[in-house]
């Protein structure tokens, strides 16, 4: 039976689903899979990109854990592609590689003043509150009024965490440093800006509904945003998701406090038809206000500018307009879309569109940061199917034996973690949370994660 040695770079849902799919469906080859991740812990964006008060989404981890705990996939954590392993290394030891490295950087917002102190990308803030080991542990929330730019689910997550009282987050798995940072927050008003109208938003009804369930937080809306044109009315009548979103927003309009004069100590302001055009700075170079242009429907589902400029005083600004992939050494990269150029998961040379033998991709590195877990599973199936069909163009490794990779990493002084190490860290975090009746308390410092994982 032909041997298939496969490396997968990225131990998030995309990488784990690809490994699982291959092992469950493949019968023609003797399959051996090594899964690499630059972090000591697996699960990628589910662990480090999902808000801690979304336990049902984190339930995905249970399914991912079941895959890894079967024991037929080797895990090498704390191993970074491009630093600890190169593409030449992979060609020497594997028949092919699947890159499932996701999208981890914030898309840029090219407006005047965006370089002001106090402007942050959503990915930075999400990584902080999720306890990512590679971001600063301190986060200062010293402004009373803050802005969030974007009308997707990430924008809602960021706004919700900024507005939510820390007492309501304590039962979750937030690390101690995050709890301390949120407890010291001076925020009273969170403003969310989107350039289009309420019927063109990108967030889902579930995430929107959660925004209105926050204790001691009023949702503030503006009547002028709900003078719908015919296109918006048609969308409400024909699209169930749009209908539900409109129903939620209309119910909020009828609440006490929707005018911003309620009794709650914090407020969430939703600004539709608001296109950011500039960030004003104070004398010290910090954010002082967001200037936006009022837009209006164009009659075709889009918007056009009205020329009317408005501004809202804010002391911090978070841009949540999309996430972006990062280039990988030796791998083609599409700078415009932030993905590995590919044809159904087969990597392509950027200039010629020729397929790159042995190199594949899946997940957000393949399609960009869109879609839910179901899309990630179908992505993986497509990529794996094409990889299997490409046997004739696989690499011919000189050292395909499984013992070669641990030896190579040891020779290079890489302190990698394995499945047993993750079990140790997992158990440790759960034990930290138990006295406080919490599911877990995350360990944040990378050196501490490694020490616990390696049993040192």
Image (cartoon, rainbow, N blue to C red):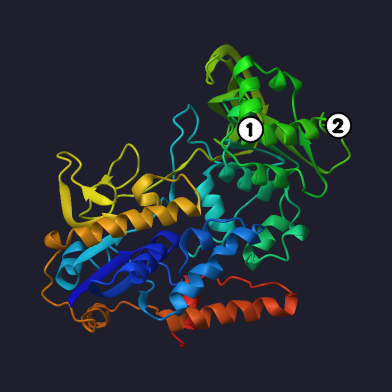
Residue 283 at x, y percent in the picture: 58, 31
Towards the viewer: 381 or 180: 381
Instruction: Give x and y (percent) for residue 189.
Output: 73, 39
Q: Position of residue 60 (x, y in %)?
A: 55, 63
Task: Say whether residue 447 is left or right of residue 27.
Answer: right
> Which residue is pictured at 43% across the width and 54% down the height?
376
Q: Are marks 1 and 2 in contact (CB under 8 Å)?
A: no
Residue located farthest toward the front when viewing the structure as drawn: 27
Of the image marks 1 and 2, the number of the one nearer the N terminus: 1
> Marks 1 and 2, how far apart in space?
28 Å
Instruction: Residue at the far bottom: name it.
Output: 456
Q: In the picture, residue 289 is in which quadrant? A: top right
Residue 29 placement: quadrant: bottom left
232 lies above or below 62: above
Residue occupied by mark 1: 242
Q: What is the number of callouts on the image?
A: 2
Q: Is residue 175 left or right of residue 102?
A: right
- The answer to whether residue 101 shows anywhere in this view is no
The residue positioned 63% from the left and 15% from the top of the image is: 230
Helix, strand or loop at mark 2: loop
Q: Residues within 10 Å of mark 1 (few under 14, many from 20)?
A: many
> Which residue: 37% across, 65% down?
21
For label 2, count other residues whose C-alpha is less than 10 Å away and answer few (under 14), some (14-19) or many (20+). Answer: few
Image-based side of 89 in relation to 339, left or right: left
At horizontal 46% and vertical 33% (from top left) the residue drawn is 109
- Whether residue 158 is situated above or below residue 403 in the rendered picture: above
Q: Is residue 212 visible?
A: yes
Q: Which residue is mark 2?
A: 261
Residue 146 percent location from the top left of the image: 66, 39
Question: Quick check: 374 above or below 271?
Answer: below
């Amino acid at each position: 039976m032909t041997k298939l040695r496969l490396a997968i770079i990225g131990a998030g849902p995309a990488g784990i689903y690809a490994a699982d799919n291959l092992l469950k469906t493949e019968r023609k080859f003797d399959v051996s899979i090594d899964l690499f991740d630059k972090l000591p812990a697996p699960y990628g964006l589910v662990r480090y990109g999902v808000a801690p008060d979304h336990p049902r989404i984190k339930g995905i981890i249970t399914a991912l854990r079941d895959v890894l705990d079967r024991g037929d996939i080797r895990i090498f954590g704390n191993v970074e592609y491009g630093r600890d392993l190169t593409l030449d290394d992979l060609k020497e030891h594997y028949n092919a590689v699947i890159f499932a490295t996701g999208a981890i950087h914030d898309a840029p917002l090219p407006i005047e003043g965006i370089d002001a102190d106090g402007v942050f990308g959503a990915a930075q803030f999400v990584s902080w509150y999720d306890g990512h080991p590679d971001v600063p542990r301190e986060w200062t929330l010293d402004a009373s009024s803050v802005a969030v730019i974007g009308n997707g689910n990430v924008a809602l997550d960021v706004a919700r965490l900024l507005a939510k009282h820390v007492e309501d987050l304590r039962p979750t798995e937030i690390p101690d440093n995050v709890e301390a940072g949120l407890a010291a927050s001076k925020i009273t008003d969170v403003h969310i800006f989107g350039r289009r109208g309420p019927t063109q938003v990108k967030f889902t009804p579930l995430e929107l509904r959660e925004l209105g369930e926050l204790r001691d937080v009023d949702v503030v809306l503006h009547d002028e945003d709900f003078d719908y044109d015919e296109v918006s009315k048609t969308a409400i009548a024909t699209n169930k998701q749009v209908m539900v979103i409109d129903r939620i927003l209309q119910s909020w309009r009828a609440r006490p406090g929707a005018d911003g004069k309620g009794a709650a100590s914090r407020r969430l302001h939703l600004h539709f038809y608001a296109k950011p055009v500039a960030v004003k700075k104070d004398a010290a170079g910090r954010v002082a206000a967001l200037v936006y242009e009022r837009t209006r429907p164009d009659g075709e589902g889009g918007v056009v500018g009205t020329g009317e400029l408005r501004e809202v005083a804010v002391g911090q600004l978070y841009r949540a307009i999309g996430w972006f992939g990062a280039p990988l050494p030796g791998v083609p990269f599409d700078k415009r879309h932030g993905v590995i150029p590919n044809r159904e998961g087969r990597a392509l040379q950027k200039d010629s569109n020729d397929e790159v033998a042995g190199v594949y991709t899946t997940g957000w590195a393949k399609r960009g940061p869109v879609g839910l877990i179901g899309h990630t599973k179908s992505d993986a199936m497509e990529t794996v199917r094409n990889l299997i069909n490409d046997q004739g163009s696989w690499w011919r490794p000189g050292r395909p034996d499984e013992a070669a990779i641990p030896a190579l990493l040891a020779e290079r002084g890489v302190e990698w973690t394995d499945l047993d190490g993750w079990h140790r860290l997992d158990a440790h975090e759960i034990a930290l949370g138990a006295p406080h009746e919490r599911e877990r308390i995350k360990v944040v410092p990378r050196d501490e994660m490694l020490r616990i994982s390696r049993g040192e």
